[in-house]
Image: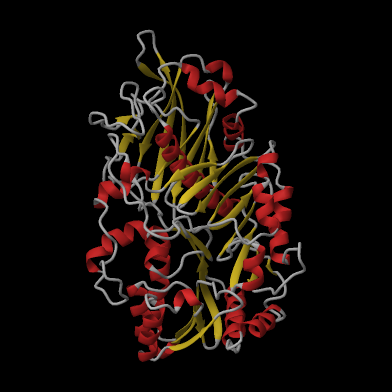
Amino acid sequence: MSYFVSQKNNGLSMVSYVGDSAVLLAFDLDQEKTANLAGFSIRCITPSKGQYQTNDYFLQNLLNFNDQITGNTSQVSIKPVGSDKAPFQQFHWMHFPSAGPGQYQYIAYASYFNSNGSVQLGPSVTANFDLEYKSFPNLEVGFTRGDISSQAYSDRFSNAPIRPAQKSIDFDTTPFQNQYQWLGAHARKLVFDFLNECQQDPSINLDVFVFDFDEPDIINSLCKLGSRVRVLQDDAPLHMGPNAMEPQATTKLQAAGVAVKKGHFNRFAHDKIMIQTRNGSAVKVLTGSANFSIRGLYVQANSVLVFDDPVVASLYEQAFQTAFALDFSNPGPATRQFATSAIGSKWNDINENDSNLPPLSVSFAPHGQVPAGQSTFSIEKISQAIQSAKSSILFAVMQMSGGGDAMSALLNLGNRTDLLSLGIIQNEGQLQLFKPGNTAAFTSFDFLSKNIPEPFKSEWGGGAGEVIHHKFVVCDFNGASPIVFCGSSNLSAGGEAENGDNLIAIYDKKIAIYYAVEAIRLFDHYQFRRLHQQSTSDKPLMLDSTDNWAKPFYDPQNIKSLQRQVLSSPT
């Protein structure tokens, strides 16, 4: 079930969107019912006791009606308060229950100020659903947590480092396993489940594209498979310098009998792919935006997709065979040869007739140079989908460089006041947050490492390099014709012309909701950091003791009104 629409009760309704180990709850309330509205209180009943809660509790709020939080002053210690006493003054809320997959029930209340100013629960609505990992029988999608710069990581691990100070591909990962499992989350599980299948079945061979490559446990797993593995390793300059880990990794792999080929196209061999083959035929493939590296799995926000489908896997194997056979001594001819090959010159459509796999298309770059002012055919599909969207565009991308129609379409979303468009972009150590009708807003990763008002704890800023590494766009996620674009492609014309990459278009509401929940999670996380950074003693962060907080959600000129309507009204 991709979402659950509750029964409307006394003007209150709720839609619950199931993401990857997360749920997005979206509320709506008849406007005439908003007088004295204090916010929304959320009760959660889980299948078992979680790490920090019982199995029946009210979600907690770090904001309350009494304590002021500002960006440049410290307060007395503030304890989280249950939302029955400190309701959420938003029309949606994201929850990541620590109890894991299983049957959940959420009960949401419209809470009101009574005559003495305290909060009392009002009408309620209920949603029941499975919070599950599996998306389809033959497709599973997982995200990294991407929360190393967060209060959650600070609480659980006290900002502990995730590797020894001296970089290496051979360090003992045992002391870091709890952090890796939490930070890598479902995406990491998919990677190691995939490798474990190869270990357990000697009939499986493995073909692998790697870009950034320094995760010791992945490298050791490939070494154990030895001659059953072929690897195509990017050897662009960033992976060949004196401090690069990739040459050490390939030397270790070769010593274990792995067939390693190094090369790059005009710019990069940018894929991050593993393909299982059996008796010469591809059977299963793992792909996505996550590099097989420490940062890729444990620092950055990324996605991993596993297609347990021979038709999809055979396309990826064709791309690997084509690339592995190229002469990379001169990247120019290699790029042109791949671009004109059968696998590199078109979208490859897969339209399943059963429920095991959603309809999808895959393209494999590089596609070669295009005339000035034009985009590759792969980018044109994205820009056309953005321009044709009817209700929403949600996205998370690493960068806006590289040009092309897709980037132009995203940058011009502010002109589409009919769409809910929310996005997050990494930008030189900061995040750029987009929303329609507004100028871009920025928030620093290291803000809470320098300014630490209670109840917040110091955070690690994320280190050098990207933290938002996603490359996805979701069009009309809860509409009649949703589309998700994802994969390893940076969604730019330059990258699609010159990089080895794969770009996936998936036409399915459930997958679209998975990615939409991730986009809203990231936007909300860093939007709160921005608001925290801007808060002052004159305008502190705290709950409003009146119902004025709700007024923007019914103002047609305010994005909050559009967000309320779109999130609470799936088609």
Q: How many marks?
A: 0
Residue 253 vs residue 534, the one in the foreground: 534
Q: Quadrant of residue 173?
A: bottom left
What coloring was used for the rendering?
secondary structure
Left of 26 or right of it: where is 492?
right
Residue in the image at 60% along x and 72% along y: 499
Q: Quadrant of residue 298?
A: bottom left
Using the image, determine if residue 383 lies above or below residue 221. above
Using the image, determine if residue 369 lies above or below residue 254. above
Q: Residue furthest top?
A: 115
Left of 476 or right of it: where is 169?
left
Q: Position of residue 220 (x, y in %)?
A: 33, 79
Residue 304 vs residue 10, the one in the foreground: 304
Image quarter of the C terminus:
top right
Q: Position of residue 197 (x, y in %)?
A: 40, 76
Residue 70 vs residue 130, the one in the foreground: 70
Residue in the image at 36% along x and 51% along y: 461
Q: Position of residue 157 (x, y in %)?
A: 25, 52
Using the image, determine if residue 4 lies above or below residue 312. above
Residue 206 can be seen, yes or no: yes
Residue in the image at 38% along x and 78% along y: 242
Residue 306 can be seen, yes or no: no
Q: Position of residue 260 (x, y in %)?
A: 46, 87
Q: Residue furthest front?
A: 242
Q: Quadrant of residue 178?
A: bottom left
